[in-house]
Amino acid sequence: MSPSALVIGEALIDEVVEGDRVSRHPGGSPANVALGLARLGVVTYLHTAIGDDADGELIHRQLSASGVTVTAGSVTNALTSKAVVILAQDGSASYRFTLSWDPAHLDDLGSPTIIHTGSLGAFLQPGSEVTRDIIRRGRSLGALISFDPNIRPTLLPEPGRTRGSFEELAFSTQLTKLSDEDAEYLYPGTPLDDVLDLLIDGGVSVAAITRGGEDAYLASGGNVVRIPSVRTRVADTVGAGDSFMAALIWALAFDKDGWDGGSISADRLQAIGDIAARAAAITVSRAGADLPYPSDIQATNLPRHEGENL
């Protein structure tokens, strides 16, 4: 059976507003991760909820063109969801959503190597129950589980309830990634190294925290490494974290030696982190969530640095 990934979560249209200019791109964090994995050569399936409308067709067409197989049950009677993305002069993005998350039950999971979920698909009712059912069944089949909460505070319950839902899912995964903003929302005032410890102590095998254009941190077992960011000219930050996530999954579970879901060495943490940082830098240098192919990553020169064990 070929190695493959199953991604569950929202796919939507990003309507990007930059001054007087408006552009529209397929997006949604889980859909972006699926696209990124497929572009990196992973056989990838996406279970989502898109409408039988022009926006849904645009999403389906882009994903298919990059090699993502969208499950047959992903087309629903609801309108395709939308995120209005407002770009500041520095390329940073703020979001306003018009969406629903009510996917169909997925009967056949296949035999995925890894199942990934995150963002609204992991939290928003009623579909979060479908997401968590797939995760439970996938674990029983031996699939690795990865998770990126990609917190959207305006769409979620108060932080205490969200933190409980987060930990219930995160502590059942082998790989969890947060941004520093996610960490601050979930654990306000807690130092990032303590958040990493909390994840590892909770059973996560590899934990990551990204910090926008600053260095990222990866932890596994007793190892914590700093991943220097790759400096690049920023077009916008849409999809940067998703690109980091997709490359992290690829480098861990599909590239070279593969992964059994256990703890890994500091050297391997540094190597996979460098790949993920490189992928994110490529994405921020492009407009929209235009995630890289392996040839893009291989062609990108990283700055010289010494890996630092923390």
Image (cartoon, rainbow, N blue to C red):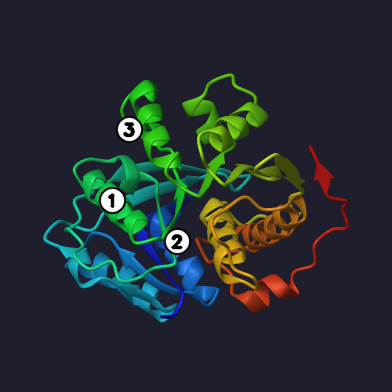
* Point 54% across, 31% down: residue: 183
Q: Residues within 10 Å of mark 1 (few under 14, many from 20)?
A: many
Q: Secondary structure at mark 1?
A: helix
Mark 1 and mark 2: Cα distance apart in space: 17 Å
Question: Which residue carries the number 2 mark?
Answer: 32
Where residue 269 appears, x then y in whole percent? 70, 53
* Point 56% across, 47% down: residue: 205
Q: Residues within 10 Å of mark 3 (few under 14, many from 20)?
A: some
Q: Quadrant of residue 308?
A: top right
Which amino acid is tagged 3?
Leu
* Point 27% across, 65% down: residue: 55
Which of the two residues, 28 or 276, is positioned nearer the viewer here? Answer: 276
The answer to which of marks 1 and 3 sits earlier in the sequence is: 1
Q: Residues within 10 Å of mark 2 (few under 14, many from 20)?
A: many
Q: Secondary structure at mark 3?
A: loop
Is residue 64 in view? yes
167 displayed left or right of 53: right
Where residue 56 appears, x then y in whole percent? 25, 66
Question: Which residue carries the number 1 mark?
Answer: 131
Label 1 or label 3, whichever lies nearer to me, is 1
Where residue 29 appears, x then y in whole percent? 42, 54
Which amino acid is tagged 2?
Asn
Which amino acid is tagged 1?
Thr
